[in-house]
Amino acid sequence: MKKAFEKLSDEELVLRMKSGDNQYFSVFVDRYESYITKKCKSYVKDEDAANDLSQEVMIKVFLQVSKFRTEAKLTTWLFSIIHNTCIDYLRSKKKRTHDVISEKLADEVFELVDADEELPEEKTVEILETLLDQMTPEGKLILLLKYKEKHSIQDIQNSLGLSESAVKMRLKRAKEMLNKLYSESLRKPK
């Protein structure tokens, strides 16, 4: 019987979970528990806290699966729950959430910046901190989904309940802001 569950696609799994059959939730946990814990640990850098947060994420999935929009990709929806849960935790602990997000975006900054030369590391951090201080939490989430997690525009729009043009516009604005900050940082005296 377990083998049959393992062959379920994510879409089939979610549909069965939405129907209220709780045995499928254990299949979900088997499939995604390590992914969830790994993502949580990338935010909090603490094994115990990451394990607690992954449990919280799984409870949220269980409670919110009925709200899952089937046209969305499960991993995109799941990442948004992970992101929001971890950010809420960091805020409650009064940690600087933009530092965590800066680390997560630092590797992808060259995809976002229109530049021919490489950014010095300190400039990258400075630009990202300035950018993130000026962005909405939803803008940060969209950047992470697109550039860190490599989700498609359609997956992001379905998971966040936005139109395609809204997702594209928010990504465009965030990239424009980053490029503006990058240009300004180059003009600053050293």
Image (cartoon, helix red, strand yellow):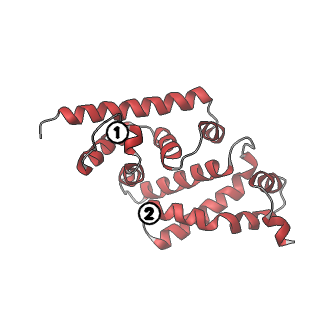
* Rendering quarter of residue 7: bottom right
Location of the C terminus (image quadrant) = top left
Contact between labelled residues 1 and 2, with CB atoms less than 8 Å apart? no
Residue depicted at 69% across the width and 65% down the height: 31
The amino acid on which the numbered mark 1 sits, given as a three-letter code, is Leu
Q: Is residue 23 visible?
A: no
Element carrying mark 2:
helix
Q: Earlier in the sequence, mark 2 or mark 1?
A: 2
Q: Which mark is residue 118?
A: none
Residue depicted at 71% across the width and 58% down the height: 62
Q: How many residues crowd mark 1 within 10 Å: few (<14), some (14–19), many (20+)?
A: many
Q: Residue furthest front?
A: 116
Instruction: Name the side, left or right, on which 48 lies relative to 177.
Output: right
**How many marks are shown on the rendered structure?**
2
The amino acid on which the numbered mark 2 sits, given as a three-letter code, is Val
Give the Cα distance between marks 2 and 1: 21 Å
Q: Work out whether 7 lies above or below 101.
A: below
Look at mark 2 in the image and give the residue it sits on.
44
Q: How many residues crowd mark 2 within 10 Å: few (<14), some (14–19), many (20+)?
A: some
Question: Where does residue 145 sit, x and y in percent of width and height?
Answer: 53, 45
Residue depicted at 49% across the width and 73% down the height: 48
Residue depicted at 27% across the width and 40% down the height: 117
Q: Residue furthest right?
A: 1
Instruction: Name the side, left or right, on which 69 lies relative to 152.
Output: right
Element carrying mark 1:
helix
Q: Is residue 28 visible?
A: yes
Question: Where does residue 149 sit, x and y in percent of width and height?
Answer: 53, 50
* Pick the front one: 147 or 66: 147
Location of the N terminus (image quadrant) = bottom right
Look at mark 1 in the image and give the residue it sits on.
131
Question: Where does residue 69 sit, x and y in percent of width and height?
Answer: 72, 42
